[in-house]
Amino acid sequence: MKDRQYLQREKKMERILDLEKRLVKEGINLEDLINTALEMYIPHPKLGTKEEMVRKLKEEFKKTFQDVNVCALVIAGLYLEEAGKKGLIPGLSKEEYEKDPVHLIADELLGIQIAQYIAGSRALFEFERFDKKKPGILKGLPPVMDDVIGGLIAGVLVKVCS
């Protein structure tokens, strides 16, 4: 019985193996990621012009989208988001989830791990800046994805600036 239910669920799931396309399906595109990074970027002459920074960010996002571990963490966030919206997180109702309760820290943990995996310890501090300000696309994302995408952007920005 469980095998049949699993197979039925698998048939319904859309198979998108490209992380960038998967994010676009969620309303998160590369341009928004870059623009959000630029909102928090503090210009430095050694890093070049704004146009050069856009190019560097685009290249690094493209590389990062190919990393299996980043993909796995982002997809975990997508599934957690889906579970929260449906009220499927034990001990957390759908209504409570939508309020982004302070005792739900799994989303921050995912964001922190994504940022640190991409760019090391310095990315933790950048993640905190993004988490507090919620610039650009982050302000419109639901409870888990704002932290997951914040971690992705923070990690890429720190890596490009290092």
Image: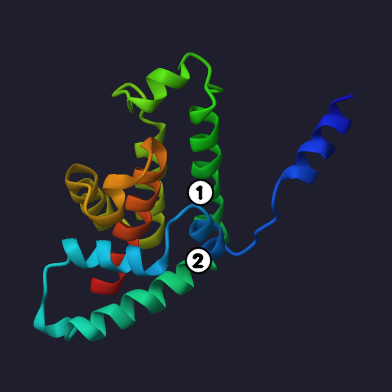
Q: Position of residue 8 (x, y in %)?
A: 82, 37
In-front residue for pair 140/89: 140
> Which mark sits nearer the N-terminus, 2 or 1?
2
In this rendering, the answer to whether 78 lies above or below 65 is: above
Q: Position of residue 145 (x, y in %)?
A: 41, 44
Q: Residue at x 11, y 68 (%)?
A: 42
- Look at mark 1 in the image and give the residue it sits on: 73
- Look at mark 2 in the image and give the residue it sits on: 65
Determine crowd level at label 2: few under 14, some 14-19, many 20+ residues with C-alpha closer than 10 A. Answer: some
Q: Position of residue 102 (x, y in %)?
A: 28, 24
The amino acid beneath tag 2 is Phe
List the single residue furthest toward the top: 91
The amino acid beneath tag 1 is Leu
In-front residue for pair 38/86: 86
Q: Residue at x 54, y 35 (%)?
A: 82
Q: Residue at x 48, y 13 (%)?
A: 91
Q: Quadrant of residue 160?
A: bottom left
